[in-house]
Image: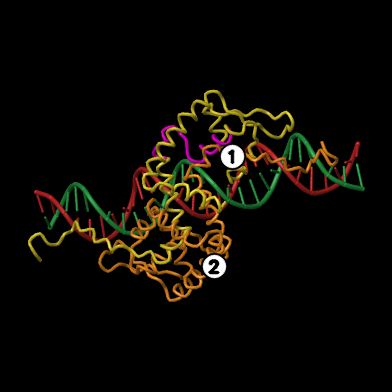
Chain colours: A orange, B yellow, C red, D green
Amino acid sequence: MGVAAKKTISPEEEPVNFGVLDHMLGYKLRRAQLTFFNSFSAACSDLGISPGLFGVLVVVKENPGLTQTAVAKALANDRSAMVGAVDKLEQMKLIERRPSKKDRRSYALFMTRYGLEFIEKLTQRVREQEEQLYKLLKPGEKETLLSILDRFD
Amino acid sequence: MGVAAKKTISPEEEPVNFGVLDHMLGYKLRRAQLTFFNSFSAACSDLGISPGLFGVLVVVKENPGLTQTAVAKALANDRSAMVGAVDKLEQMKLIERRPSKKDRRSYALFMTRYGLEFIEKLTQRVREQEEQLYKLLKPGEKETLLSILDRFD
DNA sequence: CGACATCTGTTGTCGAACAAAACAATTTGT
DNA sequence: ACAAATTGTTTTGTTCGACAACAGATGTCG
């Protein structure tokens, strides 16, 4: 061994062989999604907004009056998970549960005025966060990626 | 109303506007990953193998003697999550915990003989499952996707 | 050698995701 | 009109992953 051998500090990190995982789309998707999830959390956790909650906000904003289950179905979430999400967002004064006039079982979800300006700033922050990750892409690759991923839903 | 009017069966499903989500890579990645996750589960849940456990099996097979934390770090998992995974895989007689000879704190993980033939069949089944999803891609798109996603880890 | 920091595996706790069932209101069938 | 089936929401229980804290073992450095 060399002069400064026996490097106990040595991160003798053998590179780790990933085998078939290197060619599996499912695994790579999970890793990439984790990166985006962490980036989102770092940017928005101080506001108490997770990626899932952001999705609910956007869908409610774009489709006022939707029921909880309709939102859940649109986002491919579970209905029972929606109650906690709506509870939290209502507690933050961002959205409102109004009794539906046509069906007294269901609630119609609406954005509050405060929620509208809140999501405006939030969306901008999310956009800036994603822009940073988009720097890893060459021009056109984002659109390519989106068009391909759309086929898997 | 007309004769057969009042189509109560009518799924008056207004198409739902997704707003900015349609252009957000994070959201699309989550949806795509969910599809792959469900496909994997449908193919392998009867064997008691989840996508996460499959990753552990592959890494241990390709890198015999690795410690638990090394495997966790390679797969971007938490160390604490590894104990349950290794417990389960060891209970299935697929891998083995052997005390490390150099470091009495850590275990060295190895594949059992049965585990080796098990993962062989398992890998083939996973491959067939993914092949079905790859039918949605044009030739070359899979490689494009993999090379792009690799930049996000 | 001996104080001190670091690392490994583990446990416990918390919160999110999912399934099944309960409950309330509506719709359907006769 | 009235019983049965359906739908919207909530509750409950379970599972899973992330995070903090811990004891035992190892390494560092005076």
Q: Position of residue B76 (x, y in %)?
A: 59, 46
Closer mark to the observer between disc 1 and disc 2: 2
Q: Is residue B92 above or below residue A130?
A: above
Does the magenta portion include B42?
Answer: yes
Predominant secondary structure in magenta? helix
Determine which of the numbered discs, if any, sits on residue B82 in the image. Answer: 1
What amino acid is found at the position of numbered circle 2 in the picture?
Glu
Q: Residues within 10 Å of mark 1 (few under 14, many from 20)?
A: some
Dividing the picture into quadrants, the one containing residue B121 is: top left
Segment colored magenta: B41-60
Q: Is residue D12 above or below residue B62?
A: below
- Is A53 part of what is drawn in magenta? no
Question: What residue is disc 2 on?
Answer: A128
Q: Amino acid at mark 1?
A: Met
Could one spot residue B69 in this view of the protein? no
Is the residue B128 above or below the residue A79 in the image? Answer: above
Chain at numbered mark 2:
A
The percent coordinates of residue C14 (x first, y second) are: 56, 53
